[in-house]
C-alpha cells in the first residue's frame, strides 16, 4: 500500500518540477530578448553545452526550426534536465514568437503556447 503512494508522490513531484522548468525557460527566453529590437535571441549561450560566450543571434524566422534547447536558453548544460524529463525544446515561430515543448519519460507533454503552461496531448507549434 505504501509503494503506490510513494510512486504517485514521486510522479507528481516530477511533473511539478517539469512545469516549473518550462516556466523558467519562458522567463529565460523573454529575458534574453534583444534589448533594442525586442527580437528573440539565443541569449549568447551555446545550444550544445549551455556555456556562455557564443555570439547572440536571432532565432530563425520559420515555424519549422527548433532553434534552441531549454537548457541552453537557461545557460545550463544539456544534461541538467529535471528528473523524469527526456527533452525540452523551444520552437520559433514566424512572428518573432515561440513555443516550448517538454516531454517526460512517461510521454506526458507540457507545453507553453505563448499564453500558458499546460499538459497537452501533442507538441504545440509556435503561433
Image (tube, rainbow, N blue to C red):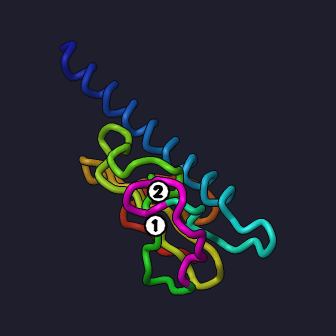
Among the 4 quarters of the image, the one containing residue 37: bottom right
Is mark 2 in CB contact (under 8 Å) with mark 1?
A: yes
Given residues 31 and 105, the one toward you in this image is 31
Residue 122 placed where, x, y %? Answer: 37, 66
Vertical placement of residue 125 versus 49, above or below: below
Q: Residue furthest top?
A: 2
Q: Which mark is residue 1?
A: none
State the residue position of label 2: 72
- Describe residue 60's horizontal placement relative to residue 120 as left or right: right
At mark 1, the secondary structure is strand
Q: Give the distance between the C-alpha atoms of the residues marked 2 and 1, in whole angstroms.
A: 7 Å
Region of the chain picked out in magenta, as a range:
46-60
- What's the residue at 52%, 41% (across, down)? 20
State the residue position of label 1: 68
Q: Residue furthest front?
A: 53
Given residues 60 and 83, the one toward you in this image is 60
Residue 54 placed where, x, y %? Answer: 52, 65
Residue 9 placed where, x, y %? Answer: 34, 25
Magenta stretch, overall SS: loop
Amino acid at each position: 500500500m505504501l509503494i503506490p503512494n510513494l510512486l504517485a508522490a514521486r510522479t507528481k513531484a516530477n511533473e511539478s518540477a517539469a512545469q516549473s522548468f518550462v516556466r523558467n525557460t519562458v522567463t529565460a527566453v523573454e529575458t534574453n530578448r534583444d534589448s533594442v529590437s525586442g527580437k528573440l535571441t539565443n541569449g549568447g549561450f551555446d545550444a550544445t553545452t549551455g556555456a556562455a560566450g557564443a555570439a547572440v543571434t536571432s532565432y530563425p524566422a520559420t515555424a519549422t526550426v527548433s532553434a534552441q534547447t531549454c537548457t541552453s536558453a537557461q545557460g545550463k548544460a544539456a544534461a541538467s534536465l529535471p528528473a523524469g524529463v527526456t527533452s525540452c525544446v523551444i520552437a520559433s515561430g514566424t512572428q518573432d514568437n515561440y513555443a516550448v515543448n517538454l516531454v517526460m519519460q512517461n510521454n506526458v507533454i507540457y507545453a507553453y503556447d505563448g499564453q500558458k503552461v499546460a499538459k497537452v496531448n501533442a507538441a504545440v507549434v509556435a503561433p
